[in-house]
Image (cartoon, coloured by chain):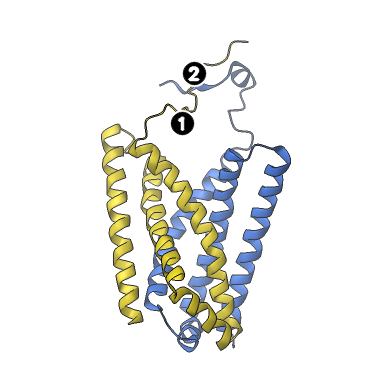
């Protein structure tokens, strides 16, 4: 039986990094980061249900430099995964699969997720005072 | 491109398509993604508005039926979508049979446990605490 002439996965060592491949792996990386972030989300909710001391400890962590750094990473991960996810949903309908549109929507996803991250973080810091 | 060219001769002979299980996983991932487009944006906006809040503010927020219901729906969609997405990542990158099956079981059970814990915390706040 002869093997079918089907496309093979690219060899990472010789494959030139491109916007399309970088955004593709970033979608997975941000997804995994958000999955880990759900541990902290549940901690925050359980702390709120437990009592004042537990919730104060959780809020103190999220207000610390490490906490804020993690929150910034999760905020960007959320908006990037969301914006790039819209690209995936669009592709699923068979639209925007040509090279030019793929690059245009890719840069749009990067710009939109960056802007939304800064907006959300600035708003959060303003609310916190 | 003719789609049939991508199939192996054996697959074409049997005529069952390339996947063993059909499109359930793929479809569930898309449906939960669409739900999270709305729920995720609402939830992140709510968290931004609660930045630095004390416990009484968070409790008062989840005492509202709309906030409690939408938060529970968000948690359900988040952990369903996470379980589906992390499953694909593990299937692609974890190659040892035992380690792969162990990781898949661990991720699925963890998502279930975290989801139940989060939802229970929300209910506890909504109905009292």
| Residue at horizontal 56 percent and vertical 40 percent from the top | B23
Q: Which chain is blue?
A: B
Crowdedness of circle 2 by 10 Å Cα count: few (<14), some, many (20+)? few
- Kindly report which numbered mark, 1 or 2, lies closer to the viewer in this rendering: 1
User: In the orientation shown, which residue stands out farthest toward the top?
Assistant: A1
Q: Position of residue A17 (x, y in %)?
A: 37, 34
The answer for which chain carries disc 1 is A
The answer for which chain carries disc 2 is B
Q: Where is residue B6 in the image (x, y as percent from the top left)?
A: 50, 22
Q: Is mark 2 on a helix, strand or loop?
A: helix
Q: Is mark 1 on a helix, strand or loop?
A: loop
Question: Which residue is label 1 attached to?
Answer: A12
Q: Compared with residue A88, is residue A42 higher up or lower down, i.e. above or below?
A: below
Q: Residue B5 carries which label?
A: 2
Chain A takes which shade in the image?
yellow
Left or right: A98 as drawn, with respect to B43: left
Left or right: B15 as drawn, with respect to A94: right
The answer to whether tags 1 and 2 share a subunit is no
Q: Compared with residue B109, is residue A88 higher up or lower down, i.e. above or below?
A: above
Structural distance between the alpha carbons of marks 1 and 2: 25 Å
| Residue at horizontal 62 percent and vertical 65 percent from the top | B114
Give the position of the N terminus of chain A as an image quadrant.
top right
| Residue at horizontal 33 percent and vertical 39 percent from the top | A19
User: Total marks drawn?
Assistant: 2
Quarter location, residue B110: bottom right
Q: Where is residue A12 in the image (x, y as percent from the top left)?
A: 46, 31
Q: Foreground residue, A32 or B120?
A: A32
Crowdedness of circle 1 by 10 Å Cα count: few (<14), some, many (20+)? few
Quarter location, residue A106: top left
User: In the orientation shown, which residue stands out farthest toward the front?
Assistant: A65
Tell whether label 2 touches label 1 (CB within 8 Å).
no
Q: Position of residue A64 (x, y in %)?
A: 44, 74
């Amino acid at each position: 039986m002869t093997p079918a002439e089907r496309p093979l996965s690219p060899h990472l060592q010789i494959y030139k990094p491109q916007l399309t491949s970088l955004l593709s792996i970033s979608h997975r990386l941000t997804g995994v980061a958000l999955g880990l972030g759900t541990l902290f989300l549940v901690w925050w909710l359980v702390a709120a249900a437990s009592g004042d001391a537990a919730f104060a400890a959780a809020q103190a962590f999220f207000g610390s430099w490490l906490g804020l750094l993690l929150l910034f990473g999760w905020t960007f991960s959320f908006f990037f995964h969301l914006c790039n996810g819209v690209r995936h949903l669009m592709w699923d309908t068979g639209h925007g699969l040509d090279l030019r549109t793929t690059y245009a929507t890719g840069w749009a996803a990067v710009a939109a997720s960056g802007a939304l991250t800064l907006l959300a973080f600035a708003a959060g810091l303003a609310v916190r005072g | 491109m003719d789609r049939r060219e991508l199939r192996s001769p054996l697959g074409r002979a049997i005529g069952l398509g390339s996947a063993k299980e059909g499109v359930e996983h793929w479809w569930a991932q898309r449906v939960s993604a669409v739900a999270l487009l709305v729920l995720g944006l609402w939830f992140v906006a709510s968290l931004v508005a609660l930045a630095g809040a004390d416990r009484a503010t968070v409790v008062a927020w989840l005492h509202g039926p709309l906030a409690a219901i939408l938060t529970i729906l968000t948690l359900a969609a988040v952990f369903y979508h996470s379980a589906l997405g992390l499953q694909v990542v593990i299937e692609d990158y974890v190659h040892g049979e035992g380690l792969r099956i162990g990781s898949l079981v661990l991720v699925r059970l963890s998502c279930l446990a975290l989801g139940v814990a989060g939802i229970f915390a929300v209910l506890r706040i909504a109905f009292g605490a």
